[in-house]
């Protein structure tokens, strides 16, 4: 039995599918401020939360400076692989019987937008039926409260989420109480509660689903 080495390569169609999915979920996770963080006169803070009703995956909301077409960051809860130790770490809302995390991110002043979301688990990816634009402003020396993004799982395929919806609410008192425990030096007199206009519900509609297959090598047997 001989194997043709020239055929030991991934199918081009599968490679393209893999690349497309990677582009969809590429981006950088926003880094939360340190526990001893002190506000500065030249930067602002974006504060909010991401919670979920659904199985283990990474639940992300994507944002970027307004007018920027390439590159983005995201806030998230969960993780995209059950092999990651962080999947089993304590989450901020565990004590309240909820799944999710608070985010507090330092940003340069300016106008920003949330424009998409995704749920990533292994090689599966669910995203919104259409993109949206929820605009907000970061001001120097101040905290902008961005509300809560809540994910609800609608369907699954085995261990991964294949469809979801996202809503947002404004549980400011709950989130601010937690923020004061985690970041004791944040100033309550510097908080602005953002009002998205018009209000949105089920942001981007029910999520769609894509699956990235692992490239399969098919040897030729002679």
Image (tube, rainbow, N blue to C red):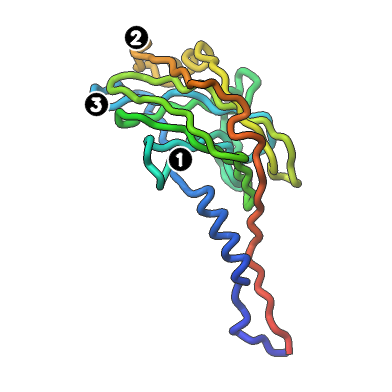
In the displayed orientation, state which residue is furthest to the front.
Answer: 198
| Residue for badge 3 | 42
| Residue found at x 69% / y 44% | 160
Vertical placement of residue 57 versus 41, above or below: below
Name the quadrant of the N terminus. bottom right
Question: Are there few (<14), some (14-19), or many (20+) residues within 10 Å of tag 1?
Answer: some
Q: At which x and y percent is residue 193?
A: 43, 15
Instruction: Tell me: residue 133, above or below residue 28.
Output: above
Q: CA distance from mark 2 to mark 3?
A: 17 Å
Q: Residues within 10 Å of mark 3 (few under 14, many from 20)?
A: few
Q: Disc 1 or 3, which lies upstream in sequence? A: 1
State the image coordinates of residue 211 (x, y, percent, origin top left): 66, 53
Element under disc 1: strand
Q: Is residue 217 above or below residue 93?
A: below
Question: In the picture, which quadrant includes the C terminus?
Answer: bottom right
Q: Is residue 71 above or below residue 168?
A: below
Instruction: State the image quarter where residue 217 is shown.
Output: bottom right
For residue 52, what is the image quadrant? top right
State the CA–CA distance, disc 1 to disc 3: 22 Å
- Looking at the rendering, which quadrant does residue 189 occupy? top left
- Which residue is label 2 attached to? 189
Label 2 vs 1, first from the N-terminus: 1
Q: Pointer 1: what residue?
A: 29
Q: Are marks 2 and 3 in contact (CB under 8 Å)?
A: no
Contact flag, marks 1 and 3 (Cβ < 8 Å): no
């Amino acid at each position: 039995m001989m194997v043709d080495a020239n055929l030991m390569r991934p199918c081009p169609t599968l490679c393209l599918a893999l690349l497309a999915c990677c582009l969809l979920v590429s981006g950088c996770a926003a880094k939360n401020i340190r526990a001893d963080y002190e506000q500065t006169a030249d930067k602002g803070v974006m504060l909010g939360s991401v919670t979920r009703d659904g199985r283990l995956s990474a639940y992300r909301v994507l944002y970027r400076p307004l007018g920027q077409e390439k590159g983005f960051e995201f806030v998230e809860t969960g993780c995209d692989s059950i092999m990651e130790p962080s999947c089993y770490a304590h989450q901020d809302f565990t004590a309240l019987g909820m799944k999710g995390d608070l985010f507090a991110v330092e940003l340069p002043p300016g106008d920003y937008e949330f424009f998409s979301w995704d749920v990533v688990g292994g090689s599966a990816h669910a995203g919104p039926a259409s993109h949206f634009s929820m605009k907000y402003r970061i001001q120097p020396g101040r905290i902008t409260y961005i509300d809560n993004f809540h994910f609800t799982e609608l369907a699954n395929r085995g261990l991964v989420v294949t469809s979801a919806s996202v809503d947002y609410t404004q549980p400011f008192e709950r989130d601010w109480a937690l923020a004061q425990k985690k970041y004791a030096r944040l100033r309550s007199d510097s908080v602005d509660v953002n009002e998205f206009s018009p209000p949105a519900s089920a942001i981007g509609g029910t999520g769609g689903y894509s699956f990235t297959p692992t490239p399969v090598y098919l040897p030729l047997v002679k």
